[in-house]
Amino acid sequence: MWRDALLVAGKDLRIEARSKVALGQVVPFALVVVLLFGLALGPAVGRGSVLSQAAPGLFWVAVLLAAVLAVQRSFAIEALDGASDGLRLSGLDPAGIFVGKAAAVAGQLLALEVVLAGAVALLYDRHLAGGLLLAASCVAATAGLVAVGTIYGVVSSGARQRETLLPLLFFPMVAPILLAATKSWDAALAGTPGRGIAWLDVLAVFAVAYLAMGTVAFGPLLEDA
Amino acid sequence: MSLTTTPTTRATAAAGAGRTGADRPGNGAPGARAAKVEGRRGRRRSDVALTAVGVCALVGVLVTVWLGLWVTPPDRFMGNLVRLLYIHPSIAWVMYICYGVAFLSSLAYLWPRTRSLRFDKLAGASSEVGVVFTGLTLVTGSIWGRPTWGTWWTWDPLLTTTALLFVLYLGYLAVRRIPGEPEVCAKRSAIAAIVAFVDVPICYFSVLWWKSLHQPPSIADPVTGKTYIHGSMAWTLLLSFVSFTLVYVWLVARRYRLFVLAEREGDEGLALALAERRAESREAQA
């Protein structure tokens, strides 16, 4: 399974490296969202301003919006040229395909989060404290996001209206991630990482639950996609 | 309603279509006719049972309204607002039944030994009714919350989870509408139902902790326990639970039958059309 996962993740990342859709469209889109929040809630900056106070939440909303695009992209590349038939016929372990596709999206999202965190620190004037907790919650939250995203990506890939269906399925599902990741970032940035540990646990539980569900459910879903 | 009287088997549909009145059954092959008569008798019995449930539900709801609005006294603390509590908890209760049944029948569909499209239809019917009752729960809760808490909405764990349930299952219903082979759709929907259902407790507990970090839960249980659980009030509430559960059974059974009819229409519609077309050309030749 792990070898298959590596193969699929490598394939997806290679396609990304050549097409540069995430770099050229998803990352700029997330930056636009960060700017839009600034316009909606600004222009005051500095400690105590709305923007600075809401920075963790706004960061994660931007990540969520970008995550939908990344997941959509991840399944759009399978929709072309009968690629999904090829994937099904390849004899790869479905669980491996699930982990591989999720890992490829996770890699892209983590890179995006680094860029976005910089943008948020800069534009919303918020010092990024508690680096370890920030990074840990990024990893756990991203794992949960891509697990749900990959399950629903394959569920909605059969639909003709998948562009509109995926966000409807995805956002309510990941509401707990938004909540927990925001709280954990809040705690880290406020300099009280102890309060964030419980939220990190929520993120980890969510990620483990949906990664496990995805490895089981992906086979039957892919068969019929 | 004319669909309910169409022949039950495809053979009789094709044979019966020889006459122009295709919706008037009764001239199929003898064996098919016997099967049909048997089927119709079973249908009639379930029809009677369903109508009885419907009548009971209607009477129950009407009596609940009468008891709730006229017979029971106003509450000592909440005054007349308490009357909303005769329907709000029972609607919420039906909502839980809906999602519970949808979850269990999705599991039953995925379990190889109980795999049957009947469970898929049941899950679909139940979750559709569930979305309606979730909407009603939110609306009645808001109407009650405005005068009692002074706000239409509060980020209480129960409220927030209910709102998320509403959108989660709207998404599930959208998944059910993705076209495809019945078995494929059923499997996909069943997985989506389980994936969504697992999210509900996670939502609830994360919102619970989220709130508890902000402020102590100022709104404890919206049902203020002892104040109304006696005498006519208790009976009204009990009747309300029973009658809304009957409403649920009736709605789900109707919706289920609609699924069956829609499926049969798909199956038999083509056969009927073909038979009619052949009969036309035969008449033209004669």
Image (cartoon, rainbow, N blue to C red):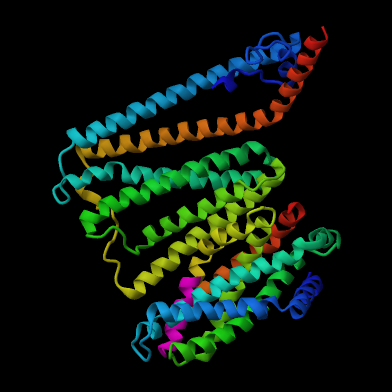
Task: Say above or below: A108 vs A126.
Answer: above
> What is the total number of numbered labels drawn onto the structure image?
0
The part of the image, by quadrant, that contains residue B65 is top left
Q: Which residue sits at x=62%, y=32%? A: B262
- Indicate the position of residue A154 as horizontal and vertical percent values: 68, 59
Q: Which residue sits at x=66%, y=53%? A: A159
From the viewer's side, name the closer residue of A19 and B259.
A19
Q: Which residue sits at x=63%, y=53%? A: B191
B169 horizontally vs A49: left or right: right
A163 horizontally vs B127: left or right: right
Question: Which residues are the magenta region?
Answer: A178-195
Q: Residue furthest right?
A: A90
Res. B68 visible in picture:
yes
- Indicate the position of residue B225 as horizontal and vertical percent values: 25, 51
The part of the image, by quadrant, that contains residue A148 is bottom right
- Indicate the position of residue B96 as horizontal and vertical percent values: 44, 47
Q: Which secondary structure type mostly characterizes the magenta part of the structure?
A: helix
Q: Which residue sits at x=53%, y=66%? A: A174
Res. A198 visible in picture:
no
From the viewer's side, name the closer residue of A189 and A85.
A85
Q: Is residue A192 magenta?
A: yes
